[in-house]
Image (cartoon, helix red, strand yellow):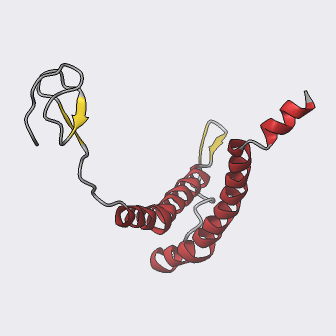
Amino acid sequence: MLTEFKAFLLRGNVVDLAVAIVIGIAFGAVVTALVADIITPLIAAIFGSHDFSALKFTINNSTFLYGAFINAVVAFVLIAAAVFFLVVKPMNALQARRTKDEPATTRPCPECLSEIPRAARRCSYCTAEVGTA
């Protein structure tokens, strides 16, 4: 049982997941600091205030702290925007640069729609003559 547990722990998926969680937590701290220390003060400089937690209203002795909700929504939108523009967009650009359009090596057979090599003159599945590509 211990050898199976050791094999499970040392399997690539578990180790990769553990590394991803640790890196994700560290990255979350960096993004949160970026939003709290740089972006939010910029918003305060433009609009005058960045803390809405004092906003509230009362109905029948029930206090609704809608300002805290607005703070949470603003923080979420800012963090999502920071992740999108600082991580997702650059990674998509790098991925697009790395991906090259390679010519297709197969084509569909006009009779049976099986994938056959591009240079084939006869389908290996239905034996129909397909001509050269």
Which corner quadrant holds the N terminus? top right
Seen from the viewer's position, the closer of residues 103 and 10 is 103
Q: Position of residue 71 (x, y in %)?
A: 57, 58
In-image side of 53 versus 125 (left or right): right
In-image side of 75 versus 99 (left or right): right
Examine the rendered structure and indicate whether residue 68 appears above or below residue 115: below
Q: Position of residue 107 (x, y in %)?
A: 20, 37
Q: Which residue of the protein is positioned furthest toward the bottom in this rendering?
A: 45
The quarter holding residue 22 reads bottom right
Q: Residue at x 53, y 73 (%)?
A: 39
Which corner quadrant holds the C terminus? top left
In-image side of 93 versus 20 (left or right): left
Q: Position of residue 92 (x, y in %)?
A: 40, 61
The quarter holding residue 2 reads top right
Q: Position of residue 12 (x, y in %)?
A: 70, 45
Q: Residue at x 62, y 59 (%)?
A: 53
Seen from the viewer's position, the closer of residues 59 and 116 is 116
Seen from the viewer's position, the closer of residues 46 and 57 is 46
Seen from the viewer's position, the closer of residues 77 and 2 is 2
Q: Residue at x 57, y 77 (%)?
A: 38
